[in-house]
Image (cartoon, rainbow, N blue to C red):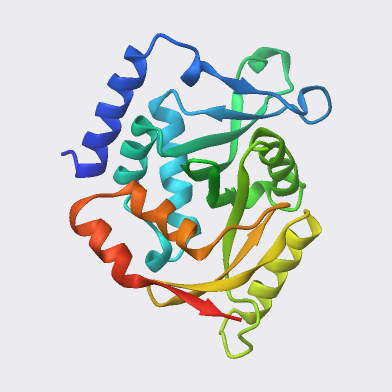
Amino acid sequence: MYNKCDIIIEIFDIRINKIKNTDFKFCINRWKERFKLELRKIKSIKQIRNIYKLYQNSFPKEEKKPFGLILIGVLRGNFEVFSIEKKKNDEKNRNSYEFKGLTIALKHKDLVLLDYLAITEEARSYGYGSKTLSFLKEYYKNYRFFLEIENAEDENAENYEERQSRKKFYLKNGFSPFPFNVDLFGIEMEILGYNCSCEFSEYLELYKNQFGGIMKKKISENIFLVEK
């Protein structure tokens, strides 16, 4: 019995296999010799299912977008999804890869929002997050590259220490705060950019560009500027 996401995944698989250019065969290997780590654009059902499972388990329900809309966004060129994978060392499986994490980015004009970054539980504390950010900073060097985190200054938050730790991680990797926060569907978020900034109006346009109809209206009604 297929659910809606299964159907979208199957359609996505059919569509990407019809594309004859090299876009979806693109494979970046920034640290091949030392780390055997690759960030690969999705091109198989297995990759999609790995990403879907980690996505569902890594983020709070209120922060997740419908996964089917993300896949549709990939086909439209609004989203970019990478599977973080490590090439196996043994001779028998030298052409096989282990799934280590995911990145999902939202694009509009010269803006790129790193919407989601997650590393599998067993691969954490090995530096994969920092290595992935290093790749992405280079890959998006001609864009204004930024991300969102839950407000780390809210001392009353239940996960205050986790928020602080997350912010320190991104600051350590070269990101710095924008001059404003946003209220994103009731959650106050800090915006951190890598050697860049943008206006709130540009940030809002990035979101509104991704969806039409009811979703576009909801976005306009649920994203607000929060002055610092």
Q: What residue is rendered at 47% in x and 28% in y?
A: 42
Q: Which residue lies furthest to the top in this view?
A: 20
Quadrant location, the C terminus: bottom right
Quadrant location, the N terminus: top left
> Does 88 sit above or below residue 177?
above
Q: How many marks?
A: 0
Q: Which of 193 and 148 is in front in this view?
A: 193
The picture places residue 206, in percent across and down from the top left corner, at 43, 52
> Does 162 sit above or below residue 206?
below
Q: Which of 222 and 1 is in front in this view?
A: 222
Q: Nearer the viewer, residue 93 or 55?
A: 55
| Horizontal side, residue 218 vs residue 206: left or right | left
Q: What residue is rendered at 19% in x and 43% in y?
A: 3
The picture places residue 165, in percent across and down from the top left corner, at 72, 70
| Horizontal side, residue 117 vs residue 13: left or right | right
> Does 36 sit above or below residue 53?
above
Q: In which quarter of the image is residue 186?
A: bottom left
Q: What residue is rendered at 48% in x and 48% in y?
A: 54
Q: Residue furthest right?
A: 34
> Does 216 sit above or below residue 221?
above
The picture places residue 139, in percent across and down from the top left corner, at 66, 33
The picture places residue 189, in percent across and down from the top left corner, at 53, 71
Q: What residue is rendered at 36% in x and 43% in y?
A: 70
